[in-house]
Image (cartoon, rainbow, N blue to C red):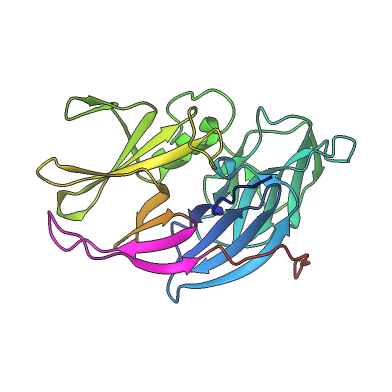
Amino acid sequence: MDTKSFPPRVHILLARDSPHAVVIRRGPAKKTCILGWDRRRHTFTVGQWLKGRIYERRCDISPVGSHWIYFAMNGKWDSETGGCWTAIARTPYLKALDLAGQSSTYYGGGLFIDNRTIWEMGGDKYLQRSGLFQQGDPDFITRYYGTGCPSVYYPRLERDGWNLRSTTINDKKYSGVLFEKELPADWKLIKVSHASDSPEGQGVYWDEHLLMRKDGTIDTFSNWEWAEWADEMIYYVAVGRLFQMQIINDSQLSEPVCLHDFHPYQFEAKPAPY
């Protein structure tokens, strides 16, 4: 029987106050690799692998990029965590400094308000506390997005400069939830976030992206699974590879440059260095 091969799924968390980033690389099934990305040198370092699923839309990185919060599931329902857990770890590793277990995926994950204050979606029981972090209520959460991934992902987008916008653009109605980020030279990067009808090889939650010029014309990039504006660059992931483009003027972009190919990685059991 033929088995289809899909490119790795990649989601990236960019630190707001430093050139650090965490890359969440998923694939093959039930295996996830965490990498650190130095955006100054464009070097990529494997942290750790997980035999399980990390819910990338419920994760966040601290402003300086030293820690991250993640929500994971390994399905070991009789384990101490209950099969799912929210953890805070040093980047780009998985070993928990703070750990809360739970037995379902309806909630979990969290966001950094600042480097030492977190907003967390909770857990059934706290198993470990480092004393490094405190709980807080973020002022950037202005809407209720329900439970699951949108409850963390959409507030993260709004905090990071994405604005919720109408689903109609140039008289065309888009399905999904649309967020818009204004770029230099009157460009706009639009993220179309879906929770159904995913393409083959994608999960329930998936994104596509649009670029709108000053004159209102639009280019659609349905294969950009992640995109962001940072470092005066448009970064995006397509078919398991990370690219960058520059804005030249109000109608022209540079040719894309591939920064990294995430295909070659294979599972490797690695301990955290702490």
| Residue 259 within the magenta-colored segment of the rendering | yes
Q: Residue furthest front?
A: 1
- Can see residue 139? no
Residue 234 placement: quadrant: bottom left
Q: Residue furthest bottom?
A: 41
Image-based side of 240 in relation to 222, left or right: right
The image quarter in which residue 109 lies:
top right
Q: Left or right: where does residue 24 sit relative to residue 171? A: right
Left or right relative to 49: residue 220: left
Residue 252 vertical placement versus 141 (above, below)? below
Residue 94, position as x, y percentages in the image: 71, 57
- Give how far across and how far down residue 157 sits, in percent: 42, 41
Residue ID at (49%, 29%): 195
User: Which quadrant is the N terminus positioned in?
Assistant: top right
Looking at the rendering, the stretch of residues picked out in magenta corresponds to 240-261
Which residue is at 70% across, 62% downward? Answer: 48
Percent of width and height locating residue 46: 64, 68
In the foreground, 27 or 200: 200
**Residue 85 visible:** yes
- Residue 89: image x %, image y %? 68, 56
Give the tally of numbered discs. Answer: 0
Of residues 108 and 42, the one drawn nearer to the viewer in this rendering: 42
- Quarter of the image that includes the C terminus: bottom right
